[in-house]
Image (cartoon, rainbow, N blue to C red):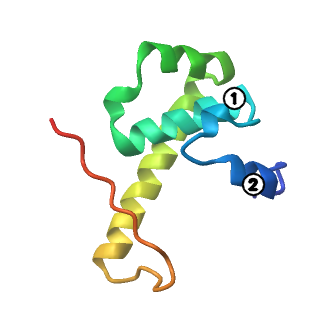
């Protein structure tokens, strides 16, 4: 589906820890920063990131992104718990932020 909407392999290779310095569009960078914040520490959704998101996305789109990331995260946890994780898939442990 992403390929059908124009995602290229070159763009995928730019999604790394240094994506803010990449040639990705400001819209893509804002979406990735939002995803990183949800996965890592939701308190990272600063007023600055909220401003960036609203420059490129409507409120319903932001909610849809947040729910999508949350659903994928929860599904991955369930699959791992049930032992359905693919053997060839690397496992990355993301610590839960301290309360």
Exactly how many numbered labels are in the figure? 2
Q: Locate residue 60: give its quadrant.
A: top right
**Where 53 sits versus 92, above or below?**
above
Asked whether 21 or 69 is in front, the reply is 21
Asked whether 66 or 35 is in front, the reply is 35
Tag of residue 27: 1
Q: Is residue 80 left or right of residue 87?
A: left
**Which residue is drawn at the image coordinates 51% and 83% (left, top)?**
88
Q: Are marks 1 and 2 in contact (CB under 8 Å)?
A: no
* Residue at the spot of label 2: 2
Give the Cα separation between the discs numbered 1 and 2: 15 Å
Among the two numbered marks 1 and 2 on one chain, the one whose residue lies closer to the N terminus:
2
Q: Quadrant of the N terminus?
A: bottom right
Q: Is residue 90 left or right of residue 57?
A: left
**Where 54 sits versus 33, above or below?**
above
The picture places residue 29, in percent across and down from the top left corner, at 64, 33
**Which residue is drawn at the image coordinates 84% and 49% (left, top)?**
6
**Where 5 sits versus 59, above or below?**
below
Whether residue 78 appears in this view of the structure is yes
The picture places residue 46, in percent across and down from the top left corner, at 41, 19
Q: Locate residue 53: give its quadrant.
A: top right
């Amino acid at each position: 589906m992403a390929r059908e909407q124009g995602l290229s392999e070159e763009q995928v290779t730019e999604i790394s820890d240094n994506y803010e310095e990449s040639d990705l569009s400001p819209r893509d960078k804002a979406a990735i920063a939002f995803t990183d914040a949800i996965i890592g520490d939701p308190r990272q959704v600063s007023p600055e990131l909220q401003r960036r998101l609203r420059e490129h996305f409507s409120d319903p789109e932001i909610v849809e992104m947040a729910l999508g990331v949350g659903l994928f995260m929860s599904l991955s946890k369930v699959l791992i718990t049930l032992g359905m994780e693919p053997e060839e898939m690397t496992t990355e442990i993301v610590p839960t932020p301290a309360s």
